[in-house]
Image: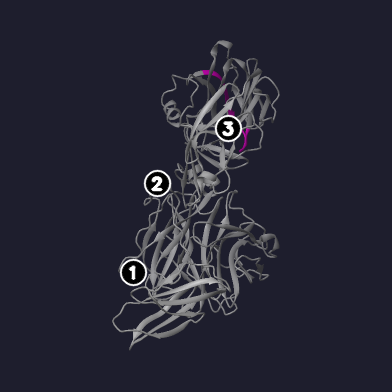
Amino acid sequence: MKFKNFISTAVVFTLSCGLYTNVSFAASGNKITEKTYSFVADTIKSDGGANSGEVQEWVITSTPQYFYIDTVEIGAIESITIRSGYDNNSAVTSVYTYDNSKNLVTEEQLKGFCTDDTRLDLIGSISDTKKGQWGYRAGVISAENINITEGGNLYELNNTSQKLTVNDNMGKKAIIVGIAGDIGTKAYFDKITIKYSRPVDAPTPFIEAIRGDGIKDNAVEIDKNNKSIIVPVIPGTDISKLNPEIVIDDCASASLTDGTWANGTITVECGDDVQKWSVQCVDRGNPVLNGFYADPNIAVFGDTYYIYPTTDGGTSWDSTYFKAFSSKDLVNWKDEGIILDLKNVSWSGGVNAWAPTIAEKNGKYYFYYSSKNKDNNEKSLGVAVSDSPTGPFVDKGEPLTDGTNLRGQIDPAVFTDDDGQSYLYWGNGSTMYAAKLADDMISFDGDWVSMNPPHFREGSFVIKRNGIYYFMWAANDTREPEYEVWYGTSTSPLGPINCATRILTCENTDDERIKSTGHHSVINIPNTDEWYICYHRFNISHYGDAEGKNTEAGNHREVCIDKMEFNSDGSIKPITATLNGITEKIKISPTHFEKCEINNGQLEFKLKANDTLNADIYTAIYDCDNVLVKVFKNEYQGSVSVTDGEQYTVKAMIWEKGGMKPIADTVIYGE
């Protein structure tokens, strides 16, 4: 089902005899005299998708189509106001009642009305013709008249005979809105307001959200048809200590009345009406960030993981700042706040803060990003510098590329080779660009290189493994379910790229609602051959059913992490995009053994520690009976006499500086 939690603020198309008002809810106690519904957020639809136009509107491209509004006291209706519009030609927008036994009308039932509407009872309609350009009209139908109160210069009434026809014997039934006719390329819907001639019982509202500490708020799945809720929580959360907020209209109360949050029942009460909702909390690593974010660049500095995403959730990718998130284990993520605001970037137009990347050199952190250039309105690349991976970052004062000569200056990705040389990759359309960065990391060393890998759209990224460079990119459009990741290989960080293979796609998931799996980055867990891919997808709770190109879904994405593995020949295995993601903590060891061997009766070791480690390191050597042979304190290499042919265990223990408290997992050689 399509349930969107957006609130639109525009005015409304009316079936009424009174003046149109912008009141969304008029109530006294549990009685109401008027209620406004958003077509995007508050209705069930037969087809279509949300779009960011003048308002958050619902768009359809064919007729007939139908909307379930609510179940109400039909005989008390004084007017119904619908604000909508269509491209051209003529249309009839009708209001029906349907006896649904006070249950929700499902999407499947609405689709059925598209081919057979004989079970619907018409109570009013407006027939009009488009005579102007794009725009809404607010039409009014009541028992007395039909008129247009907004958009009269754009629409002309054809028929005013089908006035509102209701009576007190009709009881409580579903209100269905339908549209038919030649609408051109699309029709768009904003709001509908039902006004009553007397106070009526307020409909029992639905639970709109569950939120609180440990809960992934935007990922909560609320099934309004079946009155069931799945609450994703951070893996490891003590569910017995959860104290969530249940978001519901003020006229109702809601509380957990049976069972626990792990598996229980929420009771909703509104006057004499009582609803029972099932609720279940589940551990989910994905999405890893709580909120709408996209284009994630994941990085490792010291013993900490970082994600630098695009801030999502607006319209037309209009973000204005960048945030950073940190984690010690890939499961629990901390919001580090805003690290760069475009209002502080002199050359930026203040919008399109997109797809950043980051590198460290000589204790400085270099943050590359794209933004709209105020001088030419083109997308340009920028670079900002900080002493910390969490900022604040200060821009160099001019764009790194200004978009003048080459289009597609977005989505930078930085890669540093084994010799310390860094490279920057970017591009959009069909061309990937690459350039060697100068030693200062804020300018280029030489000319750009252009490449045209198959299916390239954007989102370049490069890694290196066993001497092979893996060039990776996103294909298709981020608004499409088929947005996905491809890769090719090279023997050089500047190409050429050989072959092209798709590795992350909506066709290879463990849940059919996972779509638009693209614009990724990759990390290697230090001192291991374990690799993880970080990417975005459509927000599942709102857009898991999206089909075709969907602008709203493409502006409301969530960040995920899954495991990436290699075949024995070095090729990347197809990646399964998972619903749950990483649920076990994966920490970065602050130390590792570079050497540990026995030669001529001497056990020799060499230990490497992170530069940022401030701790005491004890290296302990045990014999086969687990008897301590020798311990070294804060010595990164050493040797001890041992017996050839015997088994020994070497452990590195990290304790707080000057104390006796372990601050990291013990590192055992060979594990």
Q: Is residue 478 above or below residue 133?
A: below
Q: Which residue is mark 2?
A: 511
Residue 101 image position (x, y, % from top left): 47, 20
Q: Is residue 352 above or below residue 94?
A: below
Q: Residues within 10 Å of mark 2 (few under 14, many from 20)?
A: some
Check residue 254 in the rendering and tell me which mark sits there, or answer none.
3
**Residue that appears at 60% across and 19% down:** 160
Q: Which residues are magenta?
A: 122-136
Q: Residues within 10 Å of mark 3 (few under 14, many from 20)?
A: many
Residue 23 image position (x, y, % from top left): 69, 30
Q: Distance of mark 3 from mark 2, alpha carbons? A: 30 Å
Is residue 76 located in the magenta-colored stretch of the structure? no
Q: Distance of mark 3 from mark 1, alpha carbons? A: 55 Å
Q: Circle 2 sits in a helix, a strand or a loop, which is it?
A: loop
Q: Circle 3 sits in a helix, a strand or a loop, which is it?
A: strand
Pair 3/2: label in front: 3
Q: Amino acid at mark 3?
A: Ala
Q: Which residue is mark 1?
A: 570
